[in-house]
Image: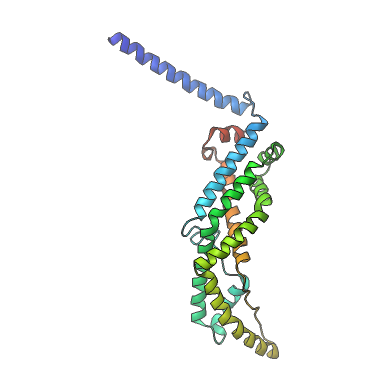
C-alpha cells in the first residue's frame, strides 16, 4: 500500500511539473513568435480588450458619485455659469443664495450623467462587434489610445443622439433641469438689467445662461466616459497583469 501511495505521489508531482513546464513553454513560444497569432486572434483580442475596458468604465461611472467624486471627470458648470458663480457676490440681486443654488445644480448634473452612463454600453457593443480585421491590426499596432480613438470616432455621433434624450430625462428625474430653469429664470432678468447699466458705463457684462443643458451635459459625460475607456486601454497595453484573459495575453504580447 505504501509503495502504491508513493508511486501515486511521484506521478502527481511529475504531471504537475510537466504541466508547469508546458505552460512556461507556451508563454515562451508565444512571446518568441513560435506560436503564431492569427489575424482572427488579433481582432478577438482587441474586441475582448474593448469589452473589458468599456464594461469597467461604464460600471465605474454608472453609480452614485461615479462622476461627482472623480475630479478627473466631474462635470463642472457651463463656462458662462462659472463666470457668474465666481462674480455672484458682486452682482446685486444674486449673492449667496445664487451660489448655493449653483452648487446644488452642479451636483445634480453629475447625478444625471451617472444615471445615463449605462445607456452607452449597447452602442459600444455594436461598434466593437463591427471591428474588421484591418481595423483590428491597425489598432493593436497603434499608439496607446488607438482603440479608444477608433471607438470614439465610431460611436460618438450615435452616443450623442442616444444619450441626449436620456440625459434630458435624467436631468429632469434628478431635478437638475428644474433647478436650472429656476436659476435661469432668476438670473437672466437680473443680468439683462445689469448688462444694460454696465453697457452705458462701459463696464463688464455677462452672457445670458442657455435654457438647454442636455447637450452640454451629454458632451461632458461622454468626455468623461472616453477618458475612462482610454485609461483602461493604456492599462491593458502597459500592464500584463491587466490582461486577465488568455487572448489578451497572446495578442498584446506582440507589442511588449
**Would residue 144 be visible to someone looking at this image?**
no
Quadrant of the rendering where the N terminus is positioned: top left
Residue 189 pos. (x, y %) = 61, 84
Outermost residue, right side: 134
The residue drawn where x is 53% and y is 53% is: 118
Number of marks in the rendered image: 0
Above or below, comparing residue 136 to residue 167 in the picture: above
Residue 225 pos. (x, y %) = 58, 54
Above or below, comparing residue 88 to residue 144 in the picture: below
Outermost residue, left side: 1
Query: Is 182 displayed left or right of 32 in the figure?
Result: left
The residue drawn where x is 60% and y is 27% is: 30
Front residue of 32/83: it is: 83
User: In terms of image quadrants, where is residue 168?
Assistant: bottom right
Query: Is 111 displayed left or right of 124 in the figure?
Result: left
Quadrant of the rendering where the C terminus is positioned: top right
The residue drawn where x is 53% and y is 51% is: 58
**Would residue 44 be visible to someone looking at this image?**
yes
Residue 164 pos. (x, y %) = 61, 61
Front residue of 19/222: it is: 222
User: In terms of image quadrants, where is residue 181?
Assistant: bottom right
Amino acid at each position: 500500500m505504501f509503495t502504491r501511495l508513493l508511486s501515486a505521489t511521484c506521478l502527481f508531482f511529475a504531471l504537475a511539473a510537466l504541466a508547469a513546464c508546458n505552460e512556461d513553454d507556451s508563454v515562451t513560444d508565444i512571446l518568441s513568435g513560435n506560436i503564431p497569432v492569427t489575424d482572427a486572434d488579433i481582432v478577438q483580442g482587441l474586441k475582448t480588450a474593448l469589452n473589458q475596458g468599456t464594461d469597467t468604465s461604464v460600471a465605474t461611472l454608472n453609480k452614485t458619485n461615479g462622476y461627482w467624486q472623480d475630479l478627473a471627470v466631474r462635470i463642472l458648470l457651463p463656462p458662462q455659469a462659472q463666470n457668474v458663480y465666481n462674480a455672484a457676490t458682486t452682482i446685486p440681486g444674486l449673492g449667496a443664495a445664487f451660489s448655493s443654488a449653483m452648487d446644488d445644480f452642479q451636483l445634480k448634473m453629475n447625478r444625471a450623467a451617472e444615471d445615463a452612463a449605462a445607456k452607452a454600453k449597447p452602442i459600444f457593443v455594436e461598434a466593437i462587434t463591427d471591428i474588421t480585421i484591418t481595423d483590428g491590426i491597425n489598432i493593436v499596432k497603434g499608439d496607446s489610445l488607438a482603440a479608444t480613438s477608433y471607438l470614439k470616432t465610431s460611436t460618438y455621433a450615435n452616443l450623442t443622439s442616444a444619450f441626449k434624450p436620456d440625459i434630458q430625462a435624467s436631468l429632469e428625474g434628478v431635478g437638475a433641469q428644474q433647478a436650472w430653469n429656476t436659476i435661469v429664470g432668476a438670473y437672466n432678468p437680473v443680468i439683462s438689467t445689469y448688462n444694460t447699466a454696465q453697457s452705458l458705463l462701459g463696464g463688464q457684462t455677462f452672457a445670458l445662461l442657455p435654457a438647454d443643458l442636455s447637450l452640454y451635459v451629454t458632451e461632458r459625460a461622454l468626455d468623461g466616459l472616453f477618458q475612462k475607456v482610454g485609461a483602461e486601454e493604456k492599462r491593458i497595453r502597459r500592464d500584463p497583469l491587466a490582461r486577465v484573459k488568455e487572448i489578451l495575453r497572446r495578442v498584446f504580447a506582440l507589442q511588449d
